[in-house]
Amino acid sequence: MDAVNDLSPPARALPIMPAEAHLSMPTQSLTRFDSKQRRRNVLASSARRPWLARLIVFGGALALTAYGAREMYKVIDVGGVTFLKLALLFLFVANFSWIALAFTSGVVGFAWSLFANRRKPPPPDALTARTAVVMPIYNEAPSRVFGALQAMWEDVEATGLGAHFDWFFLSDTTDPDVWIAEERALIALRNRLGPQARVYYRHRQKNTGRKAGNIADFVTRWGGAYEHMVVLDADSLMTGHAIVTLAAAMEKDPDSGIIQTLPLIINRNTLFARVQQFAARIYGPVIAAGLSAWMGRDGNYWGHNAIIRTAAFAAHCGLPDLRGKPPFGGHILSHDFVEAALIRRAGYSVYMLPALKGSYEESPPSLLDVSARDRRWCQGNLQHIRVLPTKGLHWASRQHLLTGIFGYLASPLWLLQLLVGILIVLQAAYIRPEYFTNEFTLFPTWPRFDAERSLALFALTMSILLAPKFLGLILALFERETRRGSGGAFGLIFSSLIEIVMSALLAPIMMLVQTGHVTHILFGFDTGWNPQRRDDGSIPLKDIIRKHRSHVGLGVVSLVAGFLISPSLVAWMSPTIAGLIFAVPISWASGMLSLGLALRNAGLLRTPEETHQPPIAQRANALADQLAAENNDAIDSIRVLHADAAFRDAHATFLPPYKKRPKGDFTADRAMAQAKISDAETIDDAIAWLKPKERMVALHDRALIELIAHLPHTADARR
């Protein structure tokens, strides 16, 4: 897009995009790295490492895992160890180590939250560097994203430091109607904010590299003008205080490469989303504090609500395509973990500010929406298996990659553990065992367990699994603002019980969902990249039944088989069986807006940000409602360009500079678009005939736009 193109009055004060300031972004090698080229720290404090926190987290997790493994071995050792028992031991240790690490990290986070200085940092008096605030968007409702960015712009301006920030919409939208709605929304936004508002917009015709490619395109073309960039998601919201504090923190720390905030979930109303929102608010700070404590300056990046040193990112975070085809080859989907690992490899610090308030996001409204998003995340995280051997990575970066990988492998491992346990019980009940093996023994090998020790181990497992939740609850009860904002002590405790029950019922469903994702990916199926549904709303019951019918079937089979084998087995597996058998009503009810609102009205699953909504969230929601009411989202792109000559001229300035098409160089979509527009007798014909891809081609082509503009409203007018 031409940097000198201007919008139509009264938004003509600024170009659509500023003058380009190029940065080289070389593709990084995963197999070669010269440690001599690693940057040296400027500040002595950057070399400090949180050894005590790491000793407690990893040493404690190792000790717990060793104890659990010993106890499990004693459970299965009664009567001799068989192949199935050894398999059960292996699967148990794999799953137990995962929750042991989460437990010890939560304990450290709880201690940090109690004793560390968590006061809100004061806003800086001055800034010296320029920062770009970038919001990648992909087929989002323009009223929501433009309302949110305006609210953030206003809040940053209120700090008196707005002159240091430029704002960018980086659109990868593929829906032609949404694309044109975005352009109209930008013109309206600039007219509302006035000529001093440096808000820019860039649309890519081809979304090469997806979000990572979107950011890389901005960095290589305009990144040279900005020392830092704050990266948002389309559902992000950050206060002016949070944004300017991030910029000040990076200015004061020349060794920092990425500084991450802890986004809290807001604006959620369905039952499922409210459970997520409550859990993130009450338990999330303890978990984040634990991560921050042991990570230190060797941290991770979650892809949004963070600030990045632009030149360092360009120099060291150019992502290679993995060899082979998707799902394990091609573009790196979960790019954020890899970018953090590469910038840390280069010698820059990556860390979190868990106590910084004012960073928000939203979450999917239903279990099926989470499932759709999880499948994409699953593929991206499993791709990290190919990234793990990357030369020169810090061990903490490899740990972050492993955490993401195991976050999805845990589900099939859990399922295998359940299946192996059932097979062992089935063997004991129905299959004649080989009592006397080839080895000489005076006593037969009985397939038995130490029931008392098994029960104690189960209690230990559940205790360390739930401990981070209880630590978060205890901390929330101690914090007056959190306690009052969550409905008081009783409301907070009762809401926590609701969350624990819902999580227990949803866990086996998510286990099977994620196991299905892993299986599909292992068999070579690519997930694609569909836009995320962000609004509250229900899903048709038939879609829910279609998604969960296999889960219900497995639950019924498990119940019947359990009763045939042993009633005690049914009691042991009752939470899992109940979650699967009732998967359809659980999924349907959890996505209901009415249930979520009823609990909110009853004072349950409330968060402080819901009881006293942050002013920036109030402003963003009010702007989104206002823009949606003005019908800025639901438009027909072809009709808008046909009817509005002023906007048609403005749209031309959004397009890349004109390049003469070589004669005979036609794509199928362009040829079809031109043929349909030429054959149309009215604008209604063109609207009815043009398919989405043909619309996109036509809206990018000045010659075809001119043909559209001359189409009559009626057939009589053409004659």
Image: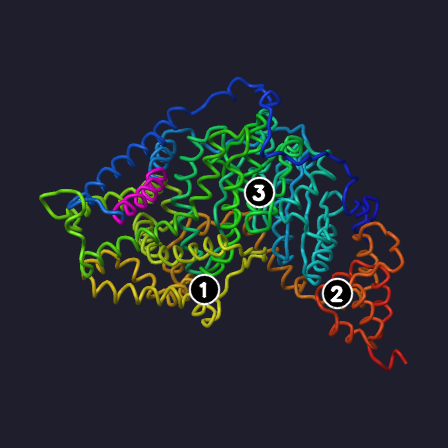
Residue 74 location in percent, x, y? 19, 41
Label 2: few (<14), some (14–19) or many (≥20) C-alpha neighbours in 10 Å: many
Image quadrant containing the C terminus: bottom right
Answer with the quarter of the image where residue 127 lies: top right
At label 2, which amino acid type do we have? Glu
Q: CA distance from mark 1 to mark 3?
A: 33 Å
Q: CA distance from mark 2 to mark 3?
A: 31 Å
Q: Secondary structure at mark 1?
A: helix
Q: Could you tell me which residue is drawn at 36 percent across and 49 percent down?
A: 413
Q: Which residue is mark 1?
A: 593
Residue range (magenta): 84-102
Q: Could you tell me which residue is drawn at 26 percent across and 39 percent down?
A: 69
The residue at the far top in this view is: 44
Q: Secondary structure at mark 3?
A: helix
Q: Mark number for residue 694?
A: 2
Q: Please tell me which of labels 1 and 3 falls first in the chain.
A: 3
Magenta region, main secondary structure: helix
**Is residue 9 in sight in this rendering?**
no
Total numbered circles: 3
* Depicted 602 relative to depicted 133: above or below: below
Q: Mark number for residue 335?
A: 3
